[in-house]
Image (cartoon, coloured by chain):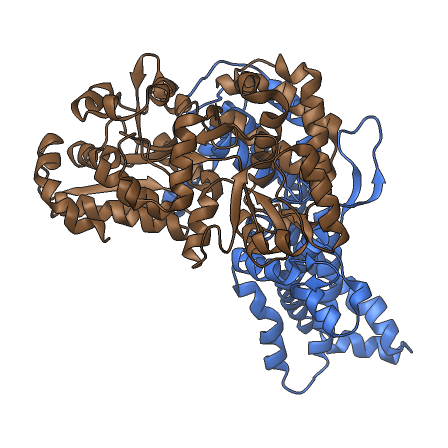
Amino acid sequence: MAFLMILPSIIAIAIFVYGFIGWTAFVSLTAWTGIKPDFTFVGLDNYVTVFGNGRFQTNMRNTVVFTAFFLVTCLVLGMLLAVMVDSRVKGEPFFRSVYLFPMAISFIVTGVAWRWIFTPGSVPNDPTGVNLLLQRAGLGFLQSNWIADNRVIPDWYPDWSKTKLGVPMAMVPVIIAAVWQMSGFTMAMYLAGLRGISEEIKEAARVDGCDELGVFRYVTLPLLRPVTLSAVVILGHISMKIFDLVVSMTNGGPGNATEVPGLYMYTQVFSANKIAQGAAVAMIMLVLVALLIVPYLRSSVSKEVE
Amino acid sequence: MTEAPAATTEAAGTAAAGGSTAGGKLEIFSWWTNGGESDGLNAMFDIYKTQNAGVEVINATVAGGAGTNAKAVLQTRLAGNQPPDSWQVHAGREALSYVNADQLEPLTGFFKEQGLDKAMPQFLLDQLTINGEIYTVPVNVHRSNVMWYNIKVFNDNGLKPPTTMDEFFTVAEALKGKGITPLAVGGSNKFEASHLFESVLLATFGPDDYPKLFDGTDTLWKDPRAAEAISTLGKMLSYSNSDRSAIGWSDAAQQVVDGKAAMTIMGDWTHGFLLSKGLKPNVDYGYMAAPGTTGSFIWLSDSFGLAKGAPDKEQALAWLAVCGSKDGQDAFNPKKGSIPARTDADLTKYDEYLQSAIKDFGSLKLAPSAAHGAATTNTYQETYHNSLEQFSSDLDEKTLLQTLTDAAADNTK
């Protein structure tokens, strides 16, 4: 009976999720270029082409940079906000909502708004957006090219790589926008975690002679570990699949300095009609996200069994 | 819109020729959403509605320069067997992708029936012919190699707009010294750098060799002139604004009319954009062939085809009749800032820029545009646009030459 209840959703997921994953995997092994399907089997050729492509290597660099900075900043900022909100400030519900609201906005909207903010204008004399604010505030020396900045720091270009390794400066505004949107969400997760820690445990630590910093370091933080893990998984899979924010904010530019695999997949499939290559990129992205999520699922399932 | 009443008298004739269509619907798919473009499209819709009363016209537009976004949506619909009745495609090699995929209905008979084979220039018909058949009806012709400049900036500084590359660099150096951006270049629409590059290629290779760059082989990309063109482009970009990737072609044109920049090289849809801003040619802005391309005309043409298995074939044929007709083209083109693909246009309807373009189109050497599908397929264009945009950012000449050489064969797909 219970099985019958879940049967419809199992069928729907089997077709619309796993069926299409299977189809994409199949297409990625064919020679399909052009509007008309071509199912000639070519093995892993598309994967070899994609990994050997300087543009895709740039995409992978960008994903690593974006994920690392986005994750760390969101976690630190989210935790800070949660601790602040949790410390019985006046008007706590108000601040909670203020921090959480950006999450309710679509990444496209966030991208367009932050694009306007970070469009540099003509530096230094005729700036726009944040550069204009800096100029007016007498902080003109802080002006930068933001989303048009083509520098990669450090500009490391080893022989085995077809792309410059380092942090593409144009990615910084994108990370700022993403953090602006998602740190409130991280705060909400941590806040729930903090509220779940019983006051008695903290009290016990204090009785044992722990100061407030010690309570946080040795009691609160370890008890928040499951929250951190969940946050890493949720934010991590968002950042690996990020597409809408980048499209609306930089469209991958300058050059390919902020292009991510999702955007590359999209242009290969829909602009260039390189369907099979796009499918290969999709499979690579799936594997990356799976590498993050599967261990998490296994650990949480095994805990439930215990 | 002012043309609509005049067209009414001819309505009966044309509609009868395309098969009278009472009621039903018609879905037209295009990427015309910007000022002059949508005005022109609406002017054609007005004529269509007068001639085909009761037909519900669905205007499916998807914004995005050079049709990048629209093509993505179209691709999905074609893959899902949900074609719009008629869609915009650049005339020339770009239609090849759709013909290869068996998505377009041949229109050779329709051209004869409508007298288009006599009304349009032979070279254009030759370019439109794929495997012996014509598949799309060209609505207009645009010129790509146009330089738009701020007359006042040049006068104030005692400079003359450059006609050769050497003159360009002399003028650019002088303007730079005065704190004016010599050349405004965009990038956010992803085709600005590649657009600029085709004028540089033409200036370097000349109109006879230029088309061979896009014949599907890498022969001419291995010619030393290819590397020379790339380094010329790099030098030009060094005289342009540093926020290229953050602004679009229309922002670049705006910088020129605002006097922040002196010149921009962009297709003559820029004219339509500037008109929609209430500006006047030869007063608020000047125009001439891009440096080094005087005597040549890089053309591109927007055209409409008939979908194979179009849901509303009868209505779509009536639409294509409007697209090809003198009335339709004379209503559309003055607003869009382009010239008709027919030779019998009513010159009085066109302003001075367009009249000069009509004259140039008939007298200069013609070369197909690479950035806008006249010489390139969708598959090739993506790499062409992206590699040039990347170059605009890092000015890495070696990588660009390598990428374009490797990609040459994509232009047959």
Residue B324 sits in which quadrant? top left
**Image coordinates for residue A272, horizontal then vertical, percent:** 51, 29
Give left or right: position of A40 versus A119.
Answer: left
**Image coordinates for residue B89, horizontal then vertical, percent:** 38, 32
Hue used for the chain lettered B: brown
Reply above or below: B99 against B184.
above
**Image coordinates for residue A90, horizontal then vertical, percent:** 67, 87
Reply above or below: A9 against A214.
above
Residue sitting at 78 percent across and 69 percent down? A220
Q: Of all residues shown, which one is farthest toward the bottom?
A: A90
Q: State the count of labels.
A: 0
Q: Nearer the viewer, residue B104 or A193?
A: B104
Hue used for the chain lettered A: blue
Residue B401 sits in which quadrant? top right
Residue B32 in view (yes/no): yes
Reply above or below: B218 against A81.
above
Residue sitting at 31 percent across and 12 percent down? B132
Q: Nearer the viewer, residue B109 or A84?
A: B109
Residue sitting at 29 percent across and 25 percent down? B120
Q: Of all residues shown, which one is farthest toward the right?
A: A209
Residue A15 in view (yes/no): no
Give left or right: position of B202 versus B349.
Answer: right
Give left or right: position of B291 versus B95.
Answer: right
Q: Nearer the viewer, residue B13 or A84?
A: B13
Q: Nearer the viewer, residue B233 or A176?
A: B233
Give left or right: position of A245 versus B49.
Answer: right
Q: Of all residues shown, which one is farthest toward the front?
A: B158
Residue sitting at 85 percent across and 77 percent down? A212
**Image coordinates for residue B91, horizontal then vertical, percent:** 38, 28
